[in-house]
Image (spheres, rainbow, N blue to C red):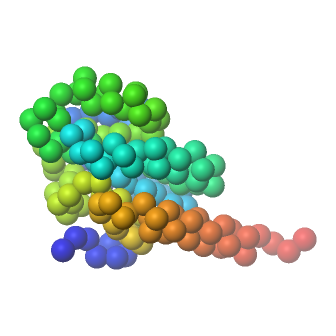
Amino acid sequence: MGLRLHTPIHPIEPVRGWLNGGPADVTRPGPPATLIHFWGLSCPLCKEQMPTVRNWVERFGPRGLRVVGIHTPLTRDDQDEGRIERMVRALDLHHPIALDQKGEVARAYQVDAVPTYFVYDAALLLRDRHTGRRAEKPVERMIERVLSEAEAKTAGDRPAA
C-alpha cells in the first residue's frame, strides 16, 4: 500500500553508515523540498535512472532541493560496501547516501521495490511517491511544483518596497 500522502517524513535510521557525508537529518526543517531515493546495487533500472537523479541534484539543488539516497540491498552481493562505494563514484553521485544494509529504513518507508522516490515539501510532509520505470517524469514534475510553491510563498512573504 505504501505511505499515505501528507505523512510526515521518517528519520533515516538505523543505518550501517553513510557515503558522501551524513548522517543526513531529514527531519530537520529547512529545505523547501526533499527527495528520498531508494535504490539497489543490483537493480539495472536504478543504475539507468541515476543520471536523472544526479541531474536533479545539479538542477534543483540551488533552488533548495535536498536529495538523500538510501541504498537497500536486494541480494547478498549488494551488502558489499566497497562495491557500493565504487558504484557511487562510477555514477558520479555526490549527495548523501545511507547504507540501509538490513532494510530497516526501507521497511519504515514501506518500500517494496526499487527505485522508489519520495518527494517531501518544506513542512516535511509527503507530496508524492513513485516507483519503477515511469517514475522520473512525475517525480520531476512534483519537485518542480513543490519548489515553485515554496518560491511563491517566499515571494509573498517579502514586505512591499
Horizontal and vertical percent position of residue 91: 41, 34
Residue at 15% from the left image edge and 44% from the top image edge = 74
Q: Is residue 69 left or right of residue 71?
A: right
Residue at 47% from the left image edge and 49% from the top image edge = 52
Horizontal and vertical percent position of residue 70: 30, 46
Quadrant position of the N terminus in the picture = bottom left
Residue at 26% from the left image edge and 71% from the top image edge = 3
As drawn, 142 above or below 88 = below
Residue that sits furthest to the right in the current view: 161
Q: Is residue 77 left or right of residue 5?
A: left
Figure label count:
0
Could you say which quadrant of the image residue 18 lies in? top left
The residue lying toward the viewer, choosing from 17 and 89, is 89
Horizontal and vertical percent position of residue 133: 32, 60
Could you say which quadrant of the image residue 20 lies in? top left
Quadrant position of the C terminus in the picture = bottom right
The residue lying toward the viewer, choosing from 74 and 157, is 74
Could you say which quadrant of the image residue 8 lies in? bottom left
Residue at 57% from the left image edge and 45% from the top image edge = 58
Horizontal and vertical percent position of residue 83: 25, 26
Residue 121 visible? The answer is no
As drawn, 2 above or below 98 = below
As drawn, 120 above or below 66 = below
The residue lying toward the viewer, choosing from 1 and 98, is 1
Residue 27 visible? The answer is yes
